[in-house]
Amino acid sequence: MYWCINMAAEATEPKTFLKALHDKYGDSDIPEGNDLVLVMHVPNSAPGMTDSGQLILPRQLAMNYHSITHAGNEEEIANLCDKVTELDIANNCISDWKEIFKMMSVMPKIESINFSCNPLMAEIDDEVGNQSFPNIKRLILNKTGAAWRTVEVLLKIMPSVEELHLSLNDYTEVDLKEKYPNVVNLHFNANKLRDWGEICKLGRAFPNLCNLVMAESEVSLCDDSEVEASFPKVVSLNANKIGITSWEEIDRLNSFPALTDVRLQGVPLLEDMKEEQRRQFLIARLPRINRLNGSKIQEEERDKAERAFLRHFMDSEEKPERYMELEKTHGQLDPLADVNLGPPTHTVTVRVTYDTKVKMMQLNVNQTVQELKVLLKKTFDISDKIKLFVFEDGIPTNELTEIRRCLYMYYIEDGIDLRII
């Protein structure tokens, strides 16, 4: 089967969701005149049509940037979208919640919906909100301007939501009156809260929260005794690019009773420190953390970090409280003992996977990411750009993005699983 796409069609003309579906997935006649036509071959596994002309849509339906303003004929949407499980309608022009619910109400299997970057500031009418969507587990409301009352209505009619995205909504406070125990993952990036007490309200509203992403925030980790009670189950915290300016604020992360995984990059306090010292100080001050900035902390690394921390402050008149705790563990150390100030030069043996090919390779840890990528492209005969990830237990845990960084700065060690994508 072939699709013929008119490249001269106006992409900014307002349209219904139904019209956008036909524009994206339907056949159209080849136009006459000078319009530019792209003929695209569609493999059998791609969306297409039945013999009777019925559109066949993917279960994960992405309809971004189609200038959608309204739903269209609900009966036809129901016929087309009865098997859709994920709907992404981000970056459109929908401003009326009635149109949103028209689409959702005829998609019985929908589990994930993304409304991001639609102007949805209007409140939901009581009549419109008197529905139920028990299957939805992921709700994305980034950059919609959705009011807190709107969020409450949505969480009430979507009682199974586990993952909630509320980033870029310019919130200056938190106004949630009920508790929502099903929410375990919350993305709250780039809002305008300054008071840590407001962040604690999120913890009280979502008592079973396990993963909190609050990057690019102006809030600092002020001293607040509510943290322990507000976030009893938070295991993972992403605090990249937040306004941390003191080590006392770093120490307050220890108030999270279950926290073991932290991301702290791009914070003002750490900007002038070298990468190795930055990581060592964070490890030394956060004794319960076992993963930092996507990399697992090994016992040997923690021991070295704590000893380096002790040596750094041993001649200081004012020592942090953590120094006293570590001195009880390690005792008094000799200055500079067992300290290697230069970069490592040894090689490690790693497993590298590309598609179905697997190779065991020896790498110099002082090699840069860029040099490694060049080597891998030659080794696996790859012509396109590549992305390189560290995998642990079959899950990507860290991407090697900084091409000028050496491998040892990513803690590449023997037995690491690298995968090319």
Image (cartoon, grey):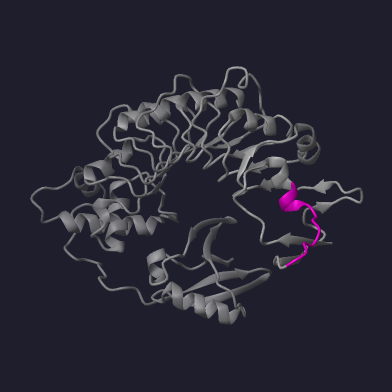
Left or right of 400 in this view: 417? right
Residue 278 lies, in percent from the top left, at: 28, 57
Left or right of 312 in this view: 401? right
Q: Does the magenta segment cover residue 30?
A: yes
Name the quarter where the N terminus is drawn: bottom right
Q: Residue furthest front?
A: 33
Q: Does the magenta segment cover residue 379?
A: no
Find the magenta span and give its range.
22-33
Q: Main secondary structure of the magenta part?
A: loop
Q: Looking at the picture, tell me which residue is in the foreground, 78 or 302.
A: 78
Residue appearing at x 62%, y 53% in the figure: 11
Name the quarter where the C terminus is drawn: bottom right
Against 1, residue 99 (above or below) is above
The answer to whether residue 58 is visible is no
Q: Residue furthest right?
A: 51
Q: Residue furthest bottom?
A: 378
Q: Looking at the picture, tell me which residue is in the foreground, 95 or 195.
A: 95
Residue 274 lies, in percent from the top left, at: 27, 63
The answer to whether residue 272 is visible is yes
Q: Looking at the picture, tell me which residue is in the foreground, 67 or 303.
A: 67
